[in-house]
Amino acid sequence: MRKGIRIAIGCAVVAAVGAGGLTLMSSSEEEAEPIRVGAVEVVTGLDPAGVYDSGSWSLFSNVYQSLMTFRPGSLQPVPDAASSCGFEGNGLTTYVCTLRDDVSFSDGREMTAQDVKFSFDRIRAIKDDQGPHTLLSTLKKVRTEGDRKVVFELSTPDATFPYKIATGAGSIVDSKTYPADRLRTDDKVSGSGPYVLAAYKKGESAELRPNDKYRGAAGTGGPVDLRYFTSAAAVSSAWKKKEVDVVSGGMPPKELADINPADPDTKVVESAAANARTLVLDQMAKDSPVKEKAVRRALAAVLDRDAISRDVYARTVDPLYSLIPQGVNGHKTPFHDSYPKPDPDRAREMLTEAGLTEPVKLTIGHAKGTMNEAEAKLIQRQLNATGLFEVKLRGSDFAVFQENISAHAFDAFLISWVADYPDPDTFTTPLVGPDPVWRNGYKSKQIQSLIERTQEEPKRERTAEDFRTVQQIVADDVPIIPLWQQKDYVLSSNEVSGTEYLSDGTNLWRLWRLNRI
């Protein structure tokens, strides 16, 4: 998913557990003291048509509702605002959903099929540069049959479409309060999720209160107050001062590495996270040297992932040698096979054979932040130490960083990709498919053909070999260099339960599962 940065660890891997249905709240629960949750993920906007980052989508999963969702630990989407969904006909080009008959927005207005159609149509009509319209690239048309049935007509077979509409891109908005042709600009949300956004201060806080009108697969929980921090040091300080009850991401890696799982006052949960950090090489940047394959391959040949994991992140992340992370169907390690260790001599041969004898000048962009800057500086030192590259760094606030990416202001940039849904397609189609989200100029007819073939296969385990081939092509062409794979760490006091369900790699942030003991 998206463009975003998440680091969140512990000792018990989250197991597959079914989520309950609707949970009615007692008056005592309504009056309960809010659970205070600290996070560092940036929320760049509240309108689903205009944002495609992990911080915003984490919030969306609590205040908006989609037709489908994921239960904790599950790889298959289940109905949420819908009572049922499924493909019709012999192909995978017609997907039909029937709405529940008791779904309404938080203001009490009944949700209809027209609201669903409106929500998808406006994403594709607005087509915001920072929005998720690329995720809906196979959607040709949405139509309704009465007030309850929604029919999605796809341009090509797409077995992953049910997964895509379970993401933030499938957030259903109130057609009476959102403009059809432009983004909503206030700090309000009109949704039907488990929570109502009671108050919001951009970059600082969000107050979530249970939505007693919610009907769906998730259930509702107690009140939650979110605090957003701009640095790992600020998160750590708030945790140590007991200003937050739960920390979901952002703690300094060295502090995470030193946490004692046996500490009776702290509960730590580690879960596998299908989130990858990458160095994207922008072949669309003006006069960029990375247009030359030899330069891209030389970069891959000298980067030291193990040093990044060790020296910057205290081994709270794992080196990654593939487009698709470990634990995801089809994973292999072609970057390790092709570039097994940092090898400046081999990189020099690559550049010399391409007629490049002078140091290659590169501008690498990154979002501001203590860890991002430390990582960028280490990569700069690694590359410059070879004598083959002269690297200049450009750091900026995340919103400006995104704008610079769209303007092709960097030869390369460091960014995390958070899985939109639990399928290898989320690491291929958006990144190296026909309409890549980062617009870095990479095109491969062979990859496109392989992606189309995987999208025609409803039994997803059968796509593994094609995804392995895609990863090998990427390692040969090097439009993107994978660096490391994240783990999710959630810290909480022993007075809070449910943290094991908070995050599991499906991009849902299940705040409604948190409770005070």
Image: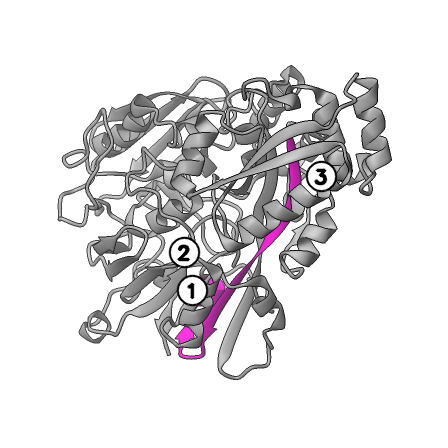
Question: Residue flagged by tag 2: what amino acid is it?
Answer: Thr
Q: Can see residue 329? A: no
What residue is disc 3 on?
383
What residue is disc 1 on?
234
Residue furthest to the bottom in view is: 264
Task: Choose top left, top right, bottom left or bottom right for residue 223.
Answer: bottom left
Q: Which residues, given as a range, are shown in magenta?
A: 480-501
The answer to whether the residue labelled 3 contacts the one labelled 2, judged by CB atoms less than 8 Å apart, is no
Question: Residue flagged by tag 1: what amino acid is it?
Answer: Ala
Provide residue 180's location: percent of width, then percent of height.
Answer: 21, 26
Task: Choose top left, top right, bottom left or bottom right for residue 362.
Answer: top right
Q: Residue at x 55, y 20 (%)?
A: 284
The answer to whether the residue labelled 2 contacts the one labelled 1, judged by CB atoms less than 8 Å apart, is yes
Task: Give the side of residue 152 with respect to residue 102, left or right.
Answer: right
| Eye-nearest disc, 3 or 1 | 3
What residue is disc 2 on?
230
* Marked residue nearer the N-terminal end (3 or 2): 2
Q: Which circle marks residue 333 in the picture?
A: none
Q: Residue at x 59, y 44 (%)?
A: 277
- For disc 1, the neighbor class at 10 Å (few under 14, some 14 to 19, many from 20) is some
Provide residue 174's location: percent of width, then percent of height.
Answer: 20, 38
What's the distance in space between the residues labelled 3 and 1, CA to CA?
Answer: 31 Å
Relative vertical location of residue 302 with respect to residue 58 in this rendering, above or below: above
Q: Residue at x 21, y 46 (%)?
A: 187
Say if the magenta span includes residue 441: no
Question: Residue flagged by tag 3: what amino acid is it?
Answer: Leu
Q: How many marks?
A: 3
Provide residue 309's location: percent of width, then percent of height.
Answer: 67, 54
Say if the magenta span includes residue 488: yes
Task: Looking at the picture, tell me which residue is in the foreground, 115 or 348.
Answer: 348
Q: Quadrant of the C terminus?
A: bottom left
